Image (tube, rainbow, N blue to C red):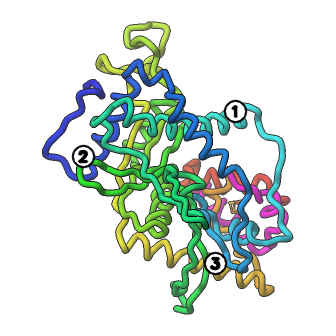
Amino acid sequence: MSALFRKVGGMSRGDRLVNDFLTQMDAYYASPASGFYDNAISRRYYEQKLRHLKFTPYPNDGLVTFGASGTNLCDRQLVFKNDKATRPEKSDDIPFRGRQRRLGTAVVDYIQLDIVHMPKRLGKGALFTMAERKNTDMFGNVTFEWDFEEAAQERKVFEYPHPETGELVQFAITAKPDGKFDYAPDGSRIIFEYKTKASGLRAMNGKLDYKGAQDDHVRQVTAEAIIFGINEALIVYESTQKPAWFSDEERTSVTKGQKTWADGQPRPDLRAFYVEITDDMKNALLSDLARQAALVYEQRAGGAVPDVTIEMTDSCGFCAFSGHCKATLTAENKTVLKRQESAMAASSMAGKAEHRNLTTYLEGVSA
Ligand code: SF4
């Protein structure tokens, strides 16, 4: 089915929003006009970016501040991040990874520029438009900015009970979303997050079909819902691999597992997921952040850094404290992890993701 003729009618709200969004995106990119930027819109966009090109520190209130996109750090990583004596490790990476990171950043910049062009290019077909925020300066002058990134950034302080002790714990959350949409059919507002995937079309679709939106991305929009009071979100994934320009279904030089077209259509390079953020989701997140913030305050007061657990090793791939973590692993913690690894190796868990993560972590730990 061509993306331009997506089905309508008899849908849940989530399906309708996803359908409307993807239809809008396809209509825009199918149009030859998407290859040209309007000078006035582009100037306004870049001027807004320029206005926010500055460093704005958090208030010096001593509170643990969670970035919405950083609410999935392992307990130990969070403690290291908030410990002034521990610096993130900056070492050279494989060069293509740097290029990939820069590609991801550029794609998000361009999607925002494209979205602010859509009302002009699509007219009433632009059901989702970037929300605008009204700013009033000290002289009463009113200006409007698109409600995304730094222009939208807010930090709020919370006091929430610790899930085990019940004691109130203070912490802050800061969020700067990829966007907030106005949805024309009913005037509702929707949080927008855009993620690029470098794993390839088939791998991206296979994973999303199986698991839906990533847990850490759902956590991110939950944090944003808490900050902005918007309880619906679209999490959108774009594969940086695109289908072959022309169908590769009949091309014998392309193996079956590498074909990017199926049934006469390109495989989707864009997927969207609707998330309705409930009070239970918000409370669960706030409770977990209260627990984590308490770990930081305990460590600042002279307490121990949390031990490494098997679950934590799921996050090691992108951790900036990996060397420090391994170097400061206690002998007891090391013994426990090695015993767990041996048990996994001898069980049906052998070679599965959890086992691999633990093995990789232990590889860097001195004997
Ligand atoms: S290396 Fe892994 S376990 Fe250690 S702090 Fe980083 S994510 Fe956590």
Tell me how far mark 1 sits from mark 3, CA to CA: 34 Å
Q: Residue at x 38, y 43 (%)?
A: 272
Q: Residues within 10 Å of mark 1 (few under 14, many from 20)?
A: few
- Residue at the disc numbered 3: 293
Q: Residue 34: say if magenta.
A: no
Give the main secondary structure of the magenta stretch.
helix
Give the image quarter of residue 299: bottom right
| Side (left or right) of 172 relative to 124 | right
Disc 3 secondary structure class: helix
Is residue 93 in view from this perspective? yes
| Side (left or right) of 62 relative to 247 | right
Q: Which residues are magenta?
A: 318-346
Q: Residue 339: say if magenta.
A: yes
Q: Amino acid at mark 3?
A: Ala
- Residue at the disc numbered 2: 16
Q: Amino acid at mark 1?
A: Arg
Q: Is residue 308 above or below residue 367?
A: below
Residue 66's tag is none
- Residue at the disc numbered 1: 99
Q: Is residue 81 above or below residue 147?
A: below
